[in-house]
Image: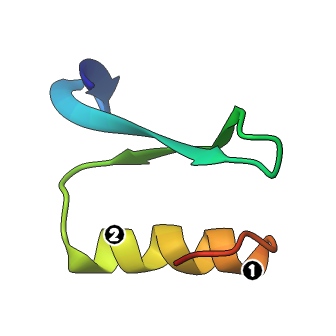
Amino acid sequence: MFYKVKEEGKVVSRCVYNILGINAEGRKDLLGTYVSESEGANFWLGVLTNLQQRGCLIY
């Protein structure tokens, strides 16, 4: 989802990513919410690294 936010007196667009996962019982869990200026390989590497450090299994 894209949002307009004020940053240093200017209005800029930011994107919010909600990361969902499925637990052992088959229910959805919100694993994290991340805000980014743009989507790219470095952003997703950071997200996946963060999830892995928190103990999530990533396949």
Residue denoted by label 2:
43
Q: Identify the mark nearer the N-term, 2 or 1.
A: 2
> Which residue reaches farthest front?
25
Marks 2/1: CA–CA distance: 15 Å
**What SS does tag 2 mark?**
helix
| Above or below, 26 relative to 58 | above
Question: From the viewer's perspective, is 23 left or right of 35?
Answer: right
Q: Nearer the viewer, residue 37 or 33?
A: 33
Residue type at the position of mark 1: Gln
Quadrant of the rendered image containing residue 55: bottom right
User: Where residue 48 sits in the image (x, y, percent)?
Assistant: 51, 73
Colour scheme in use: rainbow
Quadrant of the rendered image containing residue 35: top left
Residue denoted by label 1:
53
**What SS does tag 1 mark?**
helix
Q: Nearer the viewer, residue 6 or 27?
A: 27
Question: From the viewer's perspective, is 53 left or right of 10?
Answer: right
User: Where residue 14 sits in the image (x, y, percent)?
Assistant: 26, 35
Tags 2 and 1 touching, CB below 8 Å: no
User: Where residue 6 sits in the image (x, y, percent)?
Assistant: 30, 22
Figure disc tally: 2
In the image, what residue occupies the spot 24% across and 49% down?
A: 37
Q: Nearer the viewer, mark 2 or mark 1?
A: 1
| Above or below, 55 relative to 16 | below
